[in-house]
Image: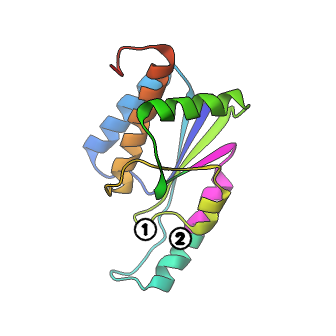
Amino acid sequence: MQIRLITVGRLKEKWLREAYAEYEKRLGRYCKLTLVELPEARLPESPSDSEIAAALETEGKAILQAAGGCLIAMCIEGKERSSEEFAEMLNQTAIRGGSTVSFLIGSSFGLSDAVKRAAQERISLSRMTFTHQIARVLLAEQLYRAFQIQTGGKYHK
């Protein structure tokens, strides 16, 4: 299975880069993981709603251009899933022929409506709010956990 993480923005903190790198290494046994980091649109200190909408549209076009296969948008209004449900969803995607899955993580303002509409699934990591940088690490951990669940590994227990 090929998994693409399409993200807007870079991991700035060393500890976040190290945490992501650890899960990236672990996931290498289960899938081909590709990270695509797209630039964030530049916004003023206190952007207006129209400036935010324009930035999301610009970022959204870049996300959709970089994505492929089954698109899964990570967004707050998405469906919350348990780790077991997430593992099953990933498994079902593979069974249906989804050899490539693109997980989409937007900037601090989220994802454009166009990206959300294009996605086959919308998933929320939690009802809590996380930075998009933390979301990347959490998603990588949940992907690793999902593969551990599928293979009966000890990590999940």
Q: What residue appears at the point 37 percent right and 41 percent down from the top-left corner?
A: 138
Q: How is the image coloured?
A: rainbow
For the point 56% across and 67% down, the residue is 112
**Residue count near mark 1 (Cα–Cα under 10 Å), binned few <14, some 14–19, many ≥20:** few
Please provide percent x and percent y for residue 39: 49, 61
SS for callout 1: loop
The image's mark for residue 109 is: 1
Establish if 112 lies above or below 43. above
The x and y percentages for residue 115 are: 61, 61
Res 75 visible: no
Q: Main secondary structure of the magenta part?
A: helix
Residue lying at 74% horizontally and 31% vertically, measured from the top left: 97
- Front in this rendered view, residue 30 or 65: 30
Q: Quadrant of the C terminus?
A: top left
Say whether disc 2 or disc 1 marks the residue closer to the N-terminus.
2
Q: Is residue 11 above or below residue 50?
A: above
Report x, y in % for residue 145: 41, 27
The residues bearing labels 2 and 1 have C-alpha atoms spaced at a distance of: 7 Å
Residue at horizontal 47 percent and vertical 77 percent from the top = 52
Q: Where does the N terminus fall, quadrant-wise?
A: top right
Residue assigned mark 2: 56
Q: Is 142 positioned to the left or the right of 53 in the image?
A: left
Q: Amino acid at mark 2?
A: Leu
Residue 106 position, x and y percent, is: 48, 59
Q: Which residues are magenta?
A: 58-72
Left or right of 119 in this view: 5: left
User: Are the two marked residues, 2 and 1, in contact with CB atoms closer than 8 angstroms?
Assistant: yes
Mark 2 surroundings within 10 Å by alpha-carbon count, few (fewer than 14), some (14 through 19), many (20 or more): many
Q: Is residue 103 above or below residue 84?
A: below
**Is residue 62 inside the magenta stretch?**
yes
Asked if residue 8 is among those painted magenta in the image, a careful observer would answer no
